[in-house]
Every structure is written in C-alpha cells, then in structure tokens.
Amino acid sequence: MFFILLFFLISWFPTTCGRLQAVCSSGMNVLNDQNAPALIKITGRLSNDSNLQRSCVLRVDKPDSFLRVRAKRNDNSTGFLHIFLYEGGGSALLGHVDVSEPAHVWNTLALCPAPRSGQTFGEKYMSVLGTSGLSFTVEIADSPSEVMLNKPKEANVESDNVMVFRFIPPKGISNTQLDITVTSQSDVPAYLKVSQTCEDVQENIEVIDYKKESLRLSFAKKGRITLSKASVPPLTDSDSSWFIGIALKNATGSVKFSESKYVTLELKKSFDYSYATPICTLFFVSLLGGIIMSIIALLLFKESLVVVNTPNAIVLANTRTSEANTGLGQDQGNNNGVEMNKCAKFGNFIVAMGKVAYNYWFSGGPKTFSILQALWVWY
C-alpha cells in the first residue's frame, strides 16, 4: 500500500529530461548530483521493526532506459541484505542484488530495457530487505554504459558480474561492417557476446546460442566480433539496440572470487562495401609490380641476345656459340651485336613483352615463370 502512495506522490514531480527521480520511505536519504543528473545515490539503515519496509519509487524519462544498480554495505555488521527491483506497481521482478560481501564491496546489477508502448516515462519499485540495523548504499545510473563509434570504453570486469554495454546503431550502418573489439593486458580468460536481446547477454553469456541470435567468443588479451549484413545475426538499419556483454570465463571454476579483468571496448566501421577501389588497386599494383620486377630481372640477368623470328613469337636466344667457330664466326658475332643494339629499342621491347604475355598468359600451352611471377605479386 505504501508504494502506491509513493506513485501518487512522484506523479506531482516535474519531469526533467535526462534525470532520474526517486521518492523513498522514511529512514532513507536520496542524494542527487547536479553534475551527474543521470545518477542518484540512496543511503539508509534497515529498521529494527520488521513491519517497517525500506522502499523507493524510481522514475525515468523513457520506459526503455538501461539502468545499472550498485549496492554495498556501509559497515561490517553480520546478516543478509537484498535489493529487489520491480516493474512499476510491483507486478514483475526485474532483478535482485545480493549484498552478501563485507563493507565497501560493490555488487552490481544491469537492468535490461523493458519498453512499454504508449508511455513517455517509466516507473520502477525498489525494495530493501535484510537484517535489522544494517546500513547500506544504493547507486542507480541511467544508461551509464552506452558505447559509441570510435570512442573506446574502459571497464573493470569482476568475477561475479557481467558488464553490459548498449550500442544504438546510426543510420546507414548496414552499408558497412562493424568491428567490436575488446583488448586487455590480463591473461584471464573472458567471454565477449553480442546480441540484440539484452537478457541473452546479461543472463546467458555462458550459454551457446543454437538459434543464431547472438555471437560469442572467448578471449584473453584481444577479441573481435564483426557484424555485417552477411553475418548471423545480420547488421541492419533497424533502430533496435545491440547489447555487448563481457564476463570472466569460469568454466573450470579456477577463477577466484576476487579476480578481475581491466578491458577496453571499441567499436569501429571497417568496410563500406565499395569494391571498385580495392579491385582497381589490386589490378594496377600487380600489373605495375610485375612489369617492374621483369625489368629488374632483365637488367640483372642481361646477356648478349639476338632476335630469332619464329611463326608464333619472337624468341630471345643466346648468341653464345662455340669458340670453335673462327674467322667468319667471329665477324658474324660482331654483326649480331649490331643487330642486337637495334632490337633493344623500347618499341621492340614492348612488342616482345606483349607477345610473351599473350602466348604464355592468355593462350593455351604451358604457363612458365612470367605468369607465376604475376600471381605472386597479386597475392
């Protein structure tokens, strides 16, 4: 009955864009930071009277707000402490934080968006239960982990917590590839999972998705998932958000409770599906590279050559003959040298190269060094 009265109370509060509001029961203090309007801090102490419940009504500007709740004890008193969050009116449980750790240890819960049609704001109900006399602090932030393109996001992933980040794709994103990269200096294994369903990332990050609605991988120091219009799930121009989850991998149970991993998450567009530029680049680089390498090879291995006319091609033959030829043979060698100098003109060289390319690249027959050289430059 109490939280119903709180709903009426909070409805009189003016709605401030981008700001969280909270109305709490007696024994709880609400602290608002003017420099961080999307963050509120609630402190209090559980009553010794078990009939008095500590509770708050939270109001956010948008029903699909992505909330992160952190809670801790303020002293080392023994006992249990639980934070429960419900949908407006207390009808559906959204999540719960078990604050069983000693003082100064934060326990975190990410609340997935739950849009409701026809509403411009959302209301949630928070209840605090535990041992009498326990002092506590609860911090609630609105969309604290939203990531954007080309803006790295740093986070410390703890062993019992799944870090969830939200990405709202801009228009025209489907015409590119989206690289989701996470890096770390730690060797502790971890999961990286991407999905358009928040609960799939938040609650099922260790579960293999056979429905192909998400992508997941394991990494130590670097991991990357690439989304495109050909991936499964595909990257589309839909306004639906993408959720990115990072959590420590503890399949063998060897990860200690106090273990953590400092990571950096970055989103970049890597390809725009414009094939003209890469294809032209590959073609001209391979063509020019093959010509340059052929000229270098000619200069390095140049010998006395003569042009021999054949029915199919101009074949460059070695004019070295046996030194047994004397007299006329020596004079003929000199004449051949003069002919070689005449055939070394640039025009004849290009014609010879063209015929070699035609006969050994595009026509039938054995493929020799020249085409292998071009293929090597291509790759």
Image: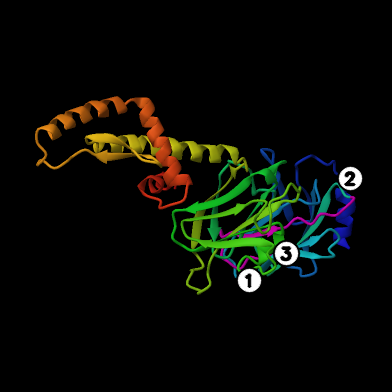
C-beta proximity under 8 Å, tags 1 and 3: no
Q: What residue is at 89 percent from the left and 56 percent from the top?
A: 5
Q: How many angstroms separate mark 2 from mark 3 (CA)?
A: 27 Å
Q: How many angstroms separate mark 2 from mark 1 (CA)?
A: 37 Å
Q: Give the residue type that dot 3 points to.
A: Gly
Say left or right for 149 vs 284.
Answer: right
Q: What residue is at 60 percent from the left and 41 percent from the top?
A: 275
Residue tagged 3:
95
Residue 114 % position (x, y) = 79, 57
Q: Give the residue type that dot 1 points to.
A: Gly
Q: Is residue 342 depicted above or below 73 in this figure?
A: above
Q: Tell me the mark number nearer the camera, choosing from 1 and 3.
A: 3
Say left or right for 244 vs 11.
Answer: left
* Magenta-drawn stretch contains 117: yes
Image quadrant in which you'd find residue 338: top left
Residue 19 % position (x, y) = 75, 43
Residue 213 % position (x, y) = 69, 62
For label 1, count other residues whose C-alpha is less than 10 Å away and answer few (under 14), some (14-19) or many (20+).
few
Which quadrant, please, contains the N terminus? bottom right
* Start-end of magenta stretch: 97-118
Image quadrant in which you'd find residue 374: top left
**Of 147 and 141, the residue lying toward us:** 147
Secondary structure of the residue carrying tag 1 is: loop
Q: Give the residue type that dot 2 points to.
A: Trp
